Image (spheres, rainbow, N blue to C red):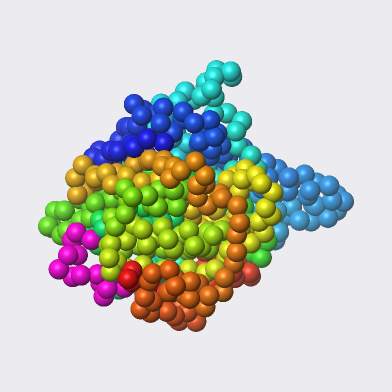
């Protein structure tokens, strides 16, 4: 993938070329067949979201209902159950979610300069690429907007993490250099923490491997026109452990804050605003080379390090890109994503599995390439892509082999590989733990305690 740089000056035009992919540079991400297939699979999954969600969530349930004895399904169809009315309401909710999926897809088509109806034999025919795993990622990405960009989700799940990160940065980075500190955020996901770091005044670069996440973060950061533009129903298609249909069909709006307007408001007051960049690629391949050595004052990893099959590579990569005495802040659980890996000599399955904490291994984030491109102004955002191979053998996180460490062992390994651990605690959010796209009303509550540590590069 070649460098692709650009700013977002006109955030009111959702159809403009945007920083993720420039039409003039479309040959970059699309020239490699495997890369092209991955991009097309993500785009196709958003395109199919509406039909897929309706079929799997409501059509099948109507069929199952009518398969019951007549006396039973008619009882359930009438008050107080009104199951058919519920399914109609779920269909309406799916359509709202699908409006967001369609908008992400449409921006992707425009950004890549692709035809919505390409010729069947064209190498740029993006249709029919999505596999079941891609569809699952599209569904979970739409749900993730609740976590990152709705008021309720951000307040409950992200804000406590962000407050801790900002306090750590304030304490451990030089105050005299605060406006020039460069921070790397691997596994940037939908870009909310990246946005908040820039909003606070830090120059921040996000890195992400999942095209589901890249397409979606580009949309929310660069193509929305006003706050609360989209209605989403993140739990509408969940029929298990629901306490009430009202809770299942809870409505949320995104974005709770409009990025461009927020930056414009800050600029009008004279407050410092950081530069925002996004890179697409494997974190290890992107930041292990000499061109990124000692580029950052801090690395912030949030719900990220457990995406490493080989933690050595992540630690060595962080050390490479940190400046002397640079700070590494980590918060997250240890839901090792490759704990069921079976070495077979093939990396296809591993490559295809990246991009989300599906089910219990839900949407955490993985990362892939580097460029220190600046935005066109302090109030704009920019996204850049660049694929770098360190050598012919290096496959980044797709290389064979994996292992899982305890939290204590992670700290020991970090210490042995050139860092001084300044602080280490188990962060449990005042005993409440942390949800990850968690329905607060569900009868099943999955909560994480997080390992929170700060390490300084020696």
Check if residue 301 falls in the magenta segment.
no
Query: Does residue 413 appear in the picture of this structure?
Result: yes
Residue shown at the point (28%, 38%) measured from the top left: 6
Q: In this view, does 234 lie above or below 17?
A: below
Classify the position of the C terminus by image quarter.
Answer: bottom left
- Relative placement, left or right, of 55 versus 232 is right
- Residue drawn where x is 24% and y is 44% of the image: 375
- Viewed as shown, does residue 295 lie left or right of 300? left
Left-right relation of 252 to 446: left
Q: 3 or 144, which lies in front?
A: 3
Of 350 and 16, nearer the camera is 350
Instruction: State the extent of the magenta-drawn residues as a range.
Output: 168-181
**Total label count?**
0
Residue 173 drawn in magenta: yes
Give the camera-side residue of 94 and 400. Answer: 400
Whether residue 101 appears in this view of the structure is no
In this view, 111 is above or below 361: above
Tell me residue 225's x, y (percent): 32, 43
Q: Where is residue 66 in the image (x, y as percent from the top left)?
A: 80, 46
Nearest the camera: 113 or 262?
A: 113
Q: In this view, does 294 lie above or below 41?
A: below
Give the farthest residue toward the left: 270
- At 61% from the left and 56% from the top, the residue drawn is 401
Residue 158 point in image, percent of width and height: 42, 65
């Amino acid at each position: 993938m070649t460098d692709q740089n650009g700013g977002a000056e006109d955030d009111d035009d959702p159809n403009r070329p945007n920083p993720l992919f420039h039409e003039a540079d479309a040959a970059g991400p699309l020239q490699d067949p495997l890369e092209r297939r991955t991009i097309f699979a993500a785009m196709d999954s958003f395109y199919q979201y509406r039909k897929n969600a309706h079929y799997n969530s409501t059509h099948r349930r109507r069929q199952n209902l009518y398969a019951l004895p007549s006396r039973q399904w008619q009882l359930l169809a009438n008050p107080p159950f009104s199951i058919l009315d519920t399914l109609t309401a779920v269909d309406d909710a799916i359509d709202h979610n699908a409006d967001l999926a369609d908008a992400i897809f449409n921006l992707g088509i425009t950004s890549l300069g692709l035809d919505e109806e390409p010729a069947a034999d064209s190498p740029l025919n993006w249709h029919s690429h999505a596999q079941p795993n891609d569809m699952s990622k599209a569904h979970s990405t739409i749900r993730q907007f609740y976590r990152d960009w709705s008021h309720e989700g951000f307040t409950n799940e992200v804000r406590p993490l962000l407050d801790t990160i900002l306090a750590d940065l304030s304490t451990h980075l030089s105050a005299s250099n605060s406006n020039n500190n460069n921070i790397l955020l691997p596994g940037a996901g939908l870009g909310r923490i990246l946005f908040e770091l820039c909003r606070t005044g830090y120059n921040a670069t996000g890195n992400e491997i999942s095209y589901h996440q890249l397409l979606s973060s580009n949309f929310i950061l660069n193509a929305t026109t006003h706050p609360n533009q989209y209605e989403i129903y993140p739990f509408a298609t969940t029929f298990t452990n629901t306490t009430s249909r009202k809770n299942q069909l809870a409505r949320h709006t995104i974005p709770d804050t409009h990025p461009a307007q927020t930056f414009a408001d800050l600029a009008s007051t004279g407050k410092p605003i950081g530069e925002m960049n996004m890179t697409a690629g494997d974190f290890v391949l992107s930041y292990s080379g000499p061109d990124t050595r000692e580029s950052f004052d801090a690395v912030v990893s949030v719900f990220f390090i457990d995406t490493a099959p080989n933690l050595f590579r992540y630690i060595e990569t962080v050390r490479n890109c940190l400046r002397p005495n640079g700070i590494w802040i980590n918060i997250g659980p240890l839901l090792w994503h490759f704990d069921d890996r079976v070495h077979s000599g093939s990396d296809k399955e591993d490559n295809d599995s990246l991009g989300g904490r599906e089910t219990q291994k839900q949407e955490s984030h993985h990362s892939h390439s580097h460029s220190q491109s600046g935005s066109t102004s302090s109030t704009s955002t920019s996204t850049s892509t660049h694929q770098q191979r360190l050598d012919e053998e290096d496959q980044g996180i797709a290389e064979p082999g994996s292992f899982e460490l305890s939290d204590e062992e992670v700290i020991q390994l970090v210490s042995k590989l050139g860092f001084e651990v300044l602080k280490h605690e188990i962060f449990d959010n005042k005993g409440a733990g942390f949800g990850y796209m968690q329905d607060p009303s569900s009868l099943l509550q999955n909560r994480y305690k997080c390992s929170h540590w700060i390490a300084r590069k020696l």
